Amino acid sequence: MEKNKVNQFENIHRPEINTNDFGTLAIDLGSSTTVVVFQKENGQPPELLDLPPISRAPGEIPSLIYKSSEKEECYLIGQQVIDLNLINEKEKNLSQDFKRWIGSTKIEPIYDSKIAPEKAGEILIHNIWKKVSEKVNIKRLVLTAPVDTYREYRNWLVNICNSLKVKEIALVDEPTAAAMGAGLKPGSTLLVLDFGGSTIDMSIVALEGGEGQASPIAQLVRFDGNNLEGKSTQVLRTAKVLGKSGLRLGGKDIDRWISHHLLPEEKPTNSILRKAEELKCELSNINIKETLIITKQVQNTNNEEKFLKLSKKGLEDLLIEKGLLKSIEKLFKQTINAAKRNSCELKDLDSVVLVGGGSRIPLIKNYLSDICNSIPFLTPPPIEAIALGALNLTPGVQVKDVLNKGVSLRCWNKKNEKHIWHPLFLAGQTWPTNKPLEIILAASINNQLSIDLIIGEPQEQGSNEIIYINGLPTLQTIESNEKIKKINNTVISIPLDPPGEIGQDCIKLMFNINDHCQLEVKGIDLRNNNEIVIYNLGDIR
């Protein structure tokens, strides 16, 4: 299969910027590296920002936080931690790989820092903001988020950005950002695999335009309340997400697999994991032989000399044994099935875009090549591709997105006389919705004073989730199609006046998904035609 190179990323502008410049800042917070890109509002090319002493290279900041004082809120950021050789400290003042735990309901023991993941992310973004603000005037901030934890991650970003003095803040999921910046022509449809340090995200995106139509430049979310819809005379152009899925597994988990496979009796220290990462990267070189063994010398916690030895064939066998290819296959099937519900087949894809460090592993690229037949591949630089794509998102245009997991309502089944989960919107449902979904609800007991609305998202049968066994990330298949995860713990009670009687149809509800992917409901009491006030059931993204 022909593998094409995206050239637009090779000419990144790096002129001098000054405090008189106004423009857009894009931040792609990564598990290993956070990318910072700025673009002046006069339309000049994007600039990878050098932010010494925290940046490793222009635009690249290691995602590391170290608390340097127990008594004060004093932190070292990014490259500072590496330069002072604090990354090997045994104390718990170091925070790394914190992105994967932001928004997580449970933090596994492998994250052993005193700094909470959300706090670490906040410190990093606020420090980046402070340093960039000293250089330029930021009129618009674009942030990216992983698919698998989008809702919780979005809420976290909204909260930490409240104190930032910027007019416009936008958010886009990472694979969509990669799609928007992949350099394809308007009217193209593409599959994006984003294999990062802590997540694998996959999506199918249709770029509107072509044949005389306007090209898409997308704005996904506005956080400050100043939505351009209704305030701009420009006709909205859309980039439609046809299907997407994600898994909280990434390159850092592969490093742990390598460490445990080669040194099963040793605790995976930061030093050992970094050497495992180096080994993984070198074995991802397409030009080395499968049988060539690469060796990395490491020291264990007792300062004893140990060796990591592995070949490309050995790495591939390990990844297959751990179920990585099966997981990617399941993500692919979930994504393509959602796209089929939006009238898109595999044959309709114009390109496959690979981003993220994990996409460099030949096994991954070859496997996707096999299941995607003859579809050409695009391989932009994996580190900065998402941030540069996010920077292409400008005000006045919207992305039409889809639900990742769907949403269900817990309600009373009159026929079986028990509570069930009833699907409201399925995975792949586009939002905002064009018309409301109507449902009639009955009372489940006599003299019922209210009807409670509880919503959840179904966990697709056959999909994977990550569990940790003795600190080692392990893929586990979700077997039950009935598994429902409550979206939040909020229960909205709709009063019944007069009280309802068992089996009696009481209220008709109209469910709608608004522009912010929030589930809204309004309705009427069927017994007296009284209107039911509009309730917001929260973000269902």
Image (cartoon, rainbow, N blue to C red):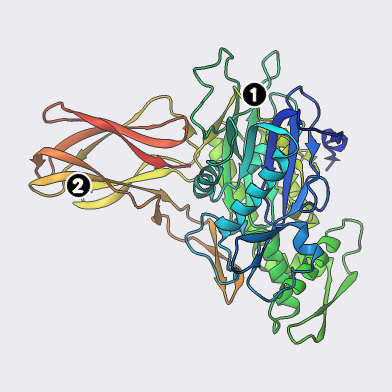
Query: In this view of the protein, which residue sits in the foreground, 408 or 198?
Result: 198
Q: Quadrant of residue 181?
A: top right
Q: How many marks?
A: 2
What residue is at 64 percent from the left and 48 percent from the top?
125
Query: In this view of the protein, which residue sits in the foreground, 140 or 104?
Result: 140
Q: Is residue 212 left or right of residue 425?
A: right
Q: Is residue 413 left or right of residue 538?
A: left
Q: Three-letter amino acid code at disc 1?
A: Glu
Using the rendered image of the protein, determine whether residue 376 is visible from the camera's viewpoint.
Answer: yes
Which residue is labeled 2 in the image?
A: 415
What residue is at 87 percent from the left and 37 percent from the top?
10
The residue tagged with tag 2: helix, strand or loop? loop
Q: Quadrant of residue 133?
A: top right
Which residue is labeled 1 in the image?
A: 208
Using the rendered image of the protein, determine whether residue 373 is visible from the camera's viewpoint.
Answer: no
Q: Earlier in the sequence, mark 2 or mark 1?
A: 1
> Between marks 2 and 1, how big is the CA–CA gap?
46 Å
From this view, report whether residue 182 is shown above or below residue 81: above
